[in-house]
Image (tube, rainbow, N blue to C red):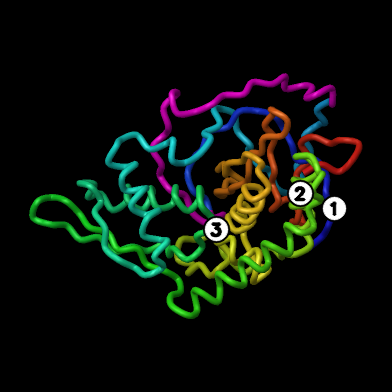
Amino acid sequence: MKKNVFAIVLAITFAITGLTGCSKEADYTESSNESVSEIQEDQNSISGIELAEVLPIEMSVDYGQGPITMYGYQCLQSDKERQVYMEIDEHVGERVPTAFSTHGISDINRISQIIDIYTLDHPEVFWIDEEINVKACDSGVSECILRYNCEGEELEERIGEFEETMEMILLSVPDDANAFEKELVINDYLIDLCEYDHEAPNDDLYVARNEIYSYGALVDHLANCEGYTKAAKVLLDRVGINNVPVGGKSDGIPHIWNAVEIDGNWYILDVTNNDYDVRVKTLRRETPFF
């Protein structure tokens, strides 16, 4: 948990490549040009600050170039997919696994992707498990039952712990702080609070614990890049800073971070690498940033 914060920011355009938990890739359908917002910036100077030489230190993160997709919901390409998304939103609030219609989408992989998109948009809903049950009917319409990683009293207790930690962190954000100052407080707090989970292997056979959830980062104080990113998104959402998770590669391994809008410009916020023993320098400001 080394606090050696330095700039990992670059106002560029991104392409969401799917949910990445630093251990696996999801095969998302690319979004259309109509569903994205592109932000172009001078690659050599951002707001008068010179771009430093890229100096990878044992780790190389490909921050990519392409469009920023504002929210995963906007990646959904059909009314059926959007209906499934809204079904998920309605049912998770009940906190009890119940069956709901998948509106004719019978491809379990696509249903899983829609759920992944939802959990990236709403990382405060940390109790959705990665596995689901799908039932195909004679009419061709499927039903889905979400699995939760905890239920009942245990879930209510975890939600209480989660909200208590959130409130504690948000109390450290000054009321009169600007967007940059709010983002910096959140970054620094997560760095102090959370440890990177070095035990989680980068293979598909690993059974994930809470490190892939915002709960893991905020309550267990242990996370991988997915947990860091989701925790950052929840906190940034709460203070009104527009942000979106973005996927890419780190040494050829799936990686995920946040794109954050500050004063109309988009920047990378990679809390994982800010709190990681191995770091990547992309842009350095005179004062710590991101």
Q: Which of the two labelled residues, at mark 3 and mark 1, occupies the earlier sequence position?
A: 1
Asked whether residue 29 is drawn in magenta, I would say: yes
Q: Residues within 10 Å of mark 1 (few under 14, many from 20)?
A: some
Quadrant where the C terminus is found in the figure? top right
Please provide percent x and percent y for residue 135: 20, 61
Q: Label 3, label 2: how many angstroms apart (C-alpha)?
A: 27 Å
Q: Residue furthest bottom?
A: 153
**Residue on which the image places disc 2:** 279
Q: Which of the two labelled residues, at mark 3 and mark 2, occupies the earlier sequence position?
A: 3
Q: Residue at x 24, y 54 (%)?
A: 101
Q: Residue at x 82, y 60 (%)?
A: 2
Q: Mark 2: which amino acid?
A: Arg
Please provide percent x and percent y for residue 198: 66, 65
Q: Main secondary structure of the magenta part?
A: loop
Which is in the foreground here, disc 3 or disc 2? 3
Q: Secondary structure at mark 3?
A: loop
State the mark number for residue 4: 1
State the mark number for residue 124: 3
Q: Residue at x 69, y 28 (%)?
A: 265
Task: Magenta stretch: give its range.
Answer: 21-49
State the mark number for residue 66: none
